[in-house]
Image: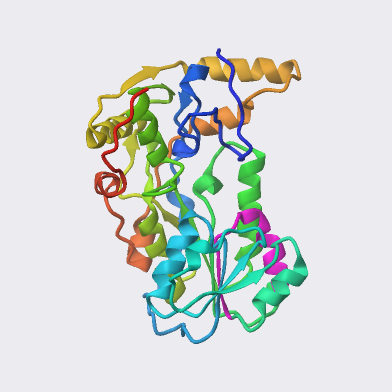
Amino acid sequence: MCPMALSTRPSALALPGTPEGALGTAVAPAACMAVATNHTAASKSSCGVHAPVDSRLVTMETPLLITGGSGYTGRRLVRRLATQGETMRLLLRSTSDTSWIDGIEPVPHVVEGDLDDPSSLHEAMDGVQRLIHLAHIRHTSALMSVLGHRPMNRVVLVSSLRAVSQVPCLSVAEVLKGEQAAGDMRATVILRPSMIYGSGDDRNLSRLASWLRRCRWLPVIGADGLHQPVHVDDVVTAIESALRGSVFGVYSIAGPEAIRYSELIDTIGAIIGVQPRVIRCPAGLVVGAARIWHGLRLPAPVGVAQVRRLLEDKQYDIEPARRDLDYSPRTLRDGLVASLDDEVETC
């Protein structure tokens, strides 16, 4: 097995020059493989309470606090809500780039602080009755402890479909702990997006497409695994619907249908005008090598549990979201066509 380097992001394998983050993980061809990640199919992952969406239930006059607003999904959400006249408050680190806020009307109020600092949270929460938590889910417990018994009208927690993985590991436990912390508040809606893609700085399929433009080939483990990516604009729409609506509970937010990883690569290739060469690598080699590294107590590029989780199918039930949130995601092909440009690079 060729050497691999583990990125600093949890549950992501990457080496320089690789479409890091594609399908949650990617390993450089220089390391002889790219891993197609999978999550277990989970129809039980959505358990929303039936109620019609009613945008009149929550007024836009009270401040809306958004955490993680400077992220890939967050920026698009802030721009969308601004067009509707939302009064927004963004909790951002002092080191965060805020240049993207220029030109947004009404201008969001930025509160500098840290989600690990209770005083920052208290300042940000002053007078707030609505919250969208887009920052890392590990901060949920601290955030909910500050909320305490505040009279919240609406709390939208953006989690991850990693929560339904059947492989026990630290990252999965972290997601579940965050969801549990938020679950005690009745006003909470928990959205679990699958792998998010789109235009711009998307670290998933756009980066994968960029790799294929340059090199035309991709070593893969789990080429037959199922995946159900979701376009970032559909995630934003789901968050907006959850904010305006009266439902509460947990919803899977994914694309309309699952597709095999090999077919996904072919679809991207057809859109960008290249014919990718998929090199299938045996998953057993990765699992075996990970076990050897673990047994010898050597610093391994990937753990056994992580490999197992990467090989799970990612197929989800979005019917509850369709029913309660009026969720209607675009097809993968439509989303990719809208997201990928026709730039051609060579390896």
Q: Quadrant of residue 287?
A: top right
Residue drawn at point x = 58 percent, y = 80 percent: 129
- Residue 292 located within the stretch drawn in magenta: no
Residue 146 in the figure: left or right of residue 69:
right
| Image position, residue 82 (x, y; %) | 42, 74
Can see residue 250? no
| 268 w.r.t. 183: above or below | above
| Image position, residue 8 (x, y; %) | 64, 37
Of the pair 244 and 83, the residue shown nearer to us: 83
| Image position, residue 13 (x, y; %) | 56, 31
Residue 88 in the figure: left or right of residue 117:
left
| Image position, residue 32 (x, y; %) | 48, 16
Give the position of the C terminus as an image quadrant. top left
Give the position of the N terminus as an image quadrant. top right
| 45 w.r.t. 248: above or below | above
- Residue 137 located within the stretch drawn in magenta: yes
Residue drawn at point x = 68 percent, y = 66 percent: 143
Can see residue 329? yes
Residue drawn at point x = 74 percent, y = 15 percent: 296
Q: Residue furthest top?
A: 1
Residue drawn at point x = 52 percent, y = 62 percent: 99
Count of all numbered marks drawn on residues in the image: 0
| 188 w.r.t. 228: above or below | below
Residue 56 in the figure: left or right of residue 17:
left
Q: Magenta residues, as a range?
A: 129-146
| 268 w.r.t. 200: above or below | above
Q: Quadrant of residue 221?
A: top left
Colour pattern of the rendering: rainbow
